[in-house]
Image (cartoon, rainbow, N blue to C red):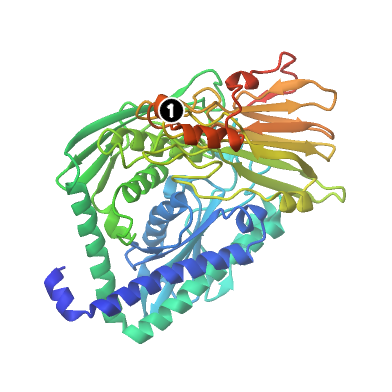
């Protein structure tokens, strides 16, 4: 587009009004998801996202939600448009999919897509994505850490019509209900996604009516081109060259003693950026493989974090970005490789990209962030009804120049919330015995890494299936600019008879009444020479009990550890 001509044709004040209106529509969709969903992982954990797209599938506006979802929606919408071209869509149609090998990310994340019509033609697309608490498969929660093929992870949905002319596809609905453990909750969340898309549709119809569809299309084109221009300008302010970084996952959930390598080379040249993952581990047997949409999500997150936050986030920001993802590798696996635990990989990819760029802009990036612990509890209530409860537990974020890391925050490419104790204990046969900051876990530095957390559960039911997906047990969170690593994570099962079992990062096992599960998440990396930390900051650390003076020796494993009943996963 010719920027001068566009500026002459469009009122800049009106362009800004429309831009902010589009963002507010996406946010209203997001709040519709949060307020109308059934499962705690959505209404409390906020594991959902909403976005608007142009008719050709370019991102138009995003809610402040989960970066992984917001990027993964891009190939999901593209796949649906391939299967159902715009000319085949009718008012009242709704489409859905979750297949990771067709643009999705992992099977619990279902995309719902709705065309928006004005004047008899599609003018936009309203879309939402929700992490569903269960989508079938070999374990409650559908995130088995010992899966070796995608068929074990749950129901794969290709691009299908969920609704036609406003009427639900009953055949598809019945098929899905039959294959999930908590069908009423599942359908409640799916209908909430449709409701969110309807909010987007109605608001866009009103906006098109007030602006005129042709003028609205011209404004959208201008906004996309402007974001691209500003993003390229931001890259041109950085040195040109190539920078590398290597990081490691604890394991793949199957071979528990083998670390998994992620290598990236970041090249900045002529206002563009390339991320090359040559040298990354081949695809693994376990479910930590990451399909291209996930690798793209990490890259897009880093681009937005590195460039000016005032640039409107839309598809224009992503035009200067290129990825090289070797086929058959951890970041571009071939089916039927399992992928359900890809979030751990995505987060490490984001950290590695930041680690490479720290060599370019050391004062603009932080030390590494701790990775997630993901838990799923499943079983039956006393009345025989199935329950599934999923939870994401965070560690500390990395420190940066001028500021300590943040304690217990889900950061970078994911952006969820913890499960409130009240909600957990109200709905599930579990009790939270302890929930507190983990002293001494943040990496020392001139700026200290954020603390991890200790969260302890007691089992109230007779038999509860536990899926535990930990990280940073074997690979602590690195510091930066001379800062020290954060403390490694640790998880322990304390059986009702007093026996202790250290969990080797990933496990699938059974908890019985009176058993306790203790999670200690990792701290973020420190930034800068620890010897330069100010006396005032050290005093506040001790006063706030963030540093005990005891050190990491307080967290050495107990001596009465046994391996009974722990199933490697």
Give coordinates of residue 126: x percent, y percent: 44, 68
Q: Classify 292 as above or below 250.
A: below
Q: Residue at x 83, y 40 (%)?
A: 460
Give coordinates of residue 169: x percent, y percent: 58, 67
State which quadrant residue 432 falls in.
Answer: top right
Nearer-the-camera pick, 376 or 283: 376
State which quadrant residue 494 falls in.
Answer: top right
Nearer-the-camera pick, 38 or 340: 38
Give coordinates of residue 278: x percent, y percent: 30, 29
- 484 left or right of 311? right
| Quarter of the picture holding the N terminus | bottom left
Say what secondary structure mark 1 lies in.
loop
Q: How many marks?
A: 1
Give coordinates of residue 20: x percent, y percent: 37, 71
| Quarter of the picture holding the C terminus | top right
Q: Classify 166 as above or below 538.
A: below
Q: Can you identify the residue that label 1 sits on?
A: 478
**Farthest right residue in view:** 383
Q: Residue at x 59, y 27 (%)?
A: 505
- 165 left or right of 400? right
Q: Is residue 138 visible?
A: no
Q: Is residue 401 visible?
A: yes
Q: Classify 410 as above or below 129.
A: above
Q: Classify 2 as above or below 419.
A: below
State which quadrant residue 412 falls in.
Answer: top left
């Amino acid at each position: 587009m010719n920027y001068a001509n566009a500026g002459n044709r469009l009122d800049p004040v009106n362009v800004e009004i429309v831009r902010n209106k589009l963002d507010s529509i996406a946010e209203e969709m997001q709040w519709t998801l949060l307020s109308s969903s059934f499962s705690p992982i959505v209404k409390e954990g906020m594991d959902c996202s909403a976005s608007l797209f142009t008719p050709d599938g370019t991102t138009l506006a995003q809610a402040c939600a989960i970066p992984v979802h917001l990027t993964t929606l891009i190939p999901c919408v593209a796949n649906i448009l391939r299967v159902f071209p715009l000319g085949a869509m009718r008012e009242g149609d709704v489409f859905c999919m979750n297949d990771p090998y067709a643009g999705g990310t992992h099977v619990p994340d279902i995309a719902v897509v709705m065309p928006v019509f004005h004047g008899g033609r599609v003018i936009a697309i309203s879309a939402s994505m929700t992490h569903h608490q269960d989508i079938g498969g070999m374990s409650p929660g559908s995130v088995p850490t010992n899966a070796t093929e995608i068929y074990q992870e749950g129901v794969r949905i290709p691009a299908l019509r969920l609704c036609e002319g406003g009427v639900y596809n009953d055949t598809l609905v019945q098929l899905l209900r039959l294959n999930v453990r908590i069908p009423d909750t599942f359908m409640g969340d799916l209908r909430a996604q449709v409701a969110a898309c309807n909010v987007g549709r109605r608001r866009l119809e009103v906006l098109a009516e007030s602006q005129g569809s042709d003028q609205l299309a011209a404004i959208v084109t201008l906004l996309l081109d402007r974001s691209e221009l500003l993003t390229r300008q931001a890259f041109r302010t950085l040195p040109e060259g190539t920078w590398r970084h290597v990081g490691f996952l604890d394991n793949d959930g199957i071979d528990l003693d083998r670390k998994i390598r992620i290598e990236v080379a970041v090249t900045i040249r002529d206002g563009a950026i390339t991320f090359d993952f040559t040298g990354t581990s081949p695809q693994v047997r376990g479910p930590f493989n990451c399909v291209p949409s996930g690798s793209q999500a990490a890259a897009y997150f880093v681009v937005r974090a590195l460039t000016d936050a005032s640039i409107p986030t839309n598809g224009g920001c992503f035009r200067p970005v290129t990825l090289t993802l070797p086929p058959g590798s951890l970041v571009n696996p071939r089916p039927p490789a399992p992928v359900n635990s890809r979030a751990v990989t995505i987060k490490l990819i984001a950290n590695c990209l930041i680690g490479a760029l720290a060599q370019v802009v050391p004062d603009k990036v932080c030390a590494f962030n701790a990775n997630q612990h993901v838990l799923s509890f499943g079983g039956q209530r006393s009345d025989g009804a199935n329950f599934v409860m999923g939870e994401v537990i965070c560690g500390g974020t990395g420190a940066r120049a001028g500021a300590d890391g943040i304690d217990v925050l889900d950061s970078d490419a994911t952006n969820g919330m913890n499960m409130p104790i009240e909600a957990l204990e109200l709905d599930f046969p579990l009790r939270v015995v302890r929930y507190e900051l983990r002293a001494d876990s943040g990496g020392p530095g001139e700026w200290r890494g954020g603390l991890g957390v200790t969260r302890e559960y007691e089992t109230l039911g007779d038999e509860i299936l536990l899926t535990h997906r930990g990280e940073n047990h074997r690979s602590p969170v690195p510091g930066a600019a001379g800062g020290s690593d954060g403390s490694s994570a640790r998880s322990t099962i304390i059986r009702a008879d007093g026996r202790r079992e250290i969990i080797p990062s990933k496990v699938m096992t059974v908890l019985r009444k009176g058993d306790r599960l203790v999670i200690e998440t990792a701290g973020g990396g420190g930034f800068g020479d620890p010897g330069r930390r100010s006396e005032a900051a050290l005093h506040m650390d001790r006063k706030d009990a963030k540093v005990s003076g005891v050190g990491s020796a307080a967290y050495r494993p107990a001596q009465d550890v046994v391996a009974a009943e722990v199933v490697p996963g």
